[in-house]
Amino acid sequence: MTENWPRRRVLGMGGAILGGGLLAAAAGGPAFAQTDPWKTADAIRRRVRAPKFPHHEYRITDFGAKGDGVTDCTRAFEAAIGTCARRGGGHVIVPPGRYLTGPITLRSFVDLHVSEGATIVFSTDPQKYPPVYTRWQGIECYNYSPFIYAYGARNVAVTGKGTLDGQAGNTAWWPWTGNTRYGWTQGIPTQGDDWNALQDMADRGVPVRERVFGPGHYLRPNMVQPYRCRDVLIEDVTIVNSPMWEIHPVLSQRVLVRNVTVSSHGPNNDGCDPESCTDVVITGSTFDTGDDCIAIKSGRNADGRRVNVPSRNILVENCEMRDGHGGVTMGSEESGGISGVFAQNLRMTSPNLGYGLRLKTNSVRGGYIHDVHMRDVEVTQIADAAIQIDFYYDEGPGHPYNPSVGGINVENLHVGTTNRVFEMRGYPDDPIRDITLTHCVFDKATNTDIVEDVEGLVLNDVTVNGKPLELATS
């Protein structure tokens, strides 16, 4: 499967070519090696605990909400959450029924509990969502309030076996992409001009308070966004029909996403996007998405460098990835850096999943992705490549901010069928460094790998198409 090599390939100092044309690092091992990195993963799990709440309950129906799917319950949610917060916190209960509302803003020590049989249905009227301080694709601005939002809060949660329905689709939110697949037709406004304007503002250093969008503009809101929060729990809920990114914690600490189901195939419908966060655990969840299942981020381009806060100490375990662009993804908004990512005990089960492990960046993003560890992953089928590391994503090379990517370790990965094992492209002056695969089996790979400008690719007991790849004499 590797008979035909790309024109450029870089070996680490002292490297040797493997059977099949792959690369090995120097005998000294990868520069990013750790003694036992999985001890760090255990420490992350111990630190990230579910917040606790007082045993007080406030039913939204006691504040005027009606579960008929027609009555606007926005004020009832506001009143219940406000009362709960003023009285020291507790659980705001959404009983069975269908509750129509505008944005919900959580406050410290409040758990929004969506009971089994309950659905929160979010209005499709953009005028219902006033601008709040947020990030849109990695750039800070004021934009439509996320459907569930918290800013600067401690001990906040969205729990319960109910459903959050964003009602996005071919008649609301999605058509703003300008894509006919998502309902756009001639005459419907699109997000392109606003997105270009926001990027231009960030590049020129326009203060965030002056980057105001929201009603009258066309940048879609996120679904759930805790911003600058601590001790956050998102548990058990099902999320459907989101305008774009579903669970998007930003600049937050100690975030636990547990036993969540995301099923939303719209544009930019990432499942969970921790951005510039520290200590995040995503566990026991199922992602069936229109974009990346999990996408770890840290800000985009000039604005990401201005904020300059990395994502670090992220643990993903015991999850299932179905449809999506990538299973576990880093970037492309990673200008603030990403490090200490651990992914284990995952199942990837859809032929419509593009990549298993996906790292995407370029020389406009800059930043770094270091110290990434994946193990014990079972994949039935991958559409494009099991592992992608792409420096040519979006704007590509030729700009002043080359990224740094290295210290990527994959162990006990089993893939049934894939187009390629590797799709890895660095730059000649900025190679990808130190990638190690150990005890990995690829039952069937149907196409030639792409490996360009990589220093130090180590393969230990890696089998492809029934044949082991072993070190060969150079």
Image (cartoon, rainbow, N blue to C red):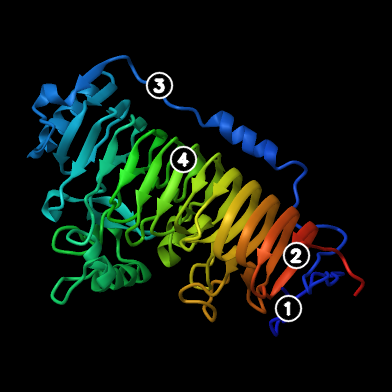
Judge the density around disc 3: few (<14), some (14-19), many (≥20) Cα neighbours within 10 Å. some
Percent coordinates x, y for residue 146 in the rendering: 26, 48
Image coordinates of residue 90 in percent, x first then y, are: 29, 20
Q: CA distance from mark 1 to mark 4?
A: 38 Å
Rounded to the nearest angstrom, the CA distance separating label 2 from label 3 is: 45 Å
In the image: residue 4, left or right of residue 469: left
Question: Which residue is denoted by mark 4 in the rendering?
Answer: 285
Lower sequence index among marks 1 and 2: 1
Q: Secondary structure at mark 1?
A: loop
The image quarter in which residue 126 lies:
bottom left
Residue 161 is situated, as x and y percent measured from the top left of the image, at 33, 31
Mark 4–mark 3 CB contact (< 8 Å):
no
The CA span between labels 3 and 1 is 53 Å
Q: Secondary structure at mark 4?
A: loop
Mark 4 or 2: in front is: 4
Q: Quickly name the residue at label 3.
A: 52
Residue shown at 10% from the left, 30% from the top: 66
User: Which of marks 2 and 4 precedes in the sequence?
Assistant: 4
Residue 367 showing in the rendered view: no
Relative to the observer, which residue lies in front, 384 or 209? 384
Q: Which residue is mark 1?
A: 9
The nearer-to-camera label among 1 and 4 is 4
Which image quarter: residue 122? top left
Q: What residue would you read off at disc 2?
A: 457
The N terminus sits in image quarter: bottom right
Amino acid type of disc 2?
Answer: Leu
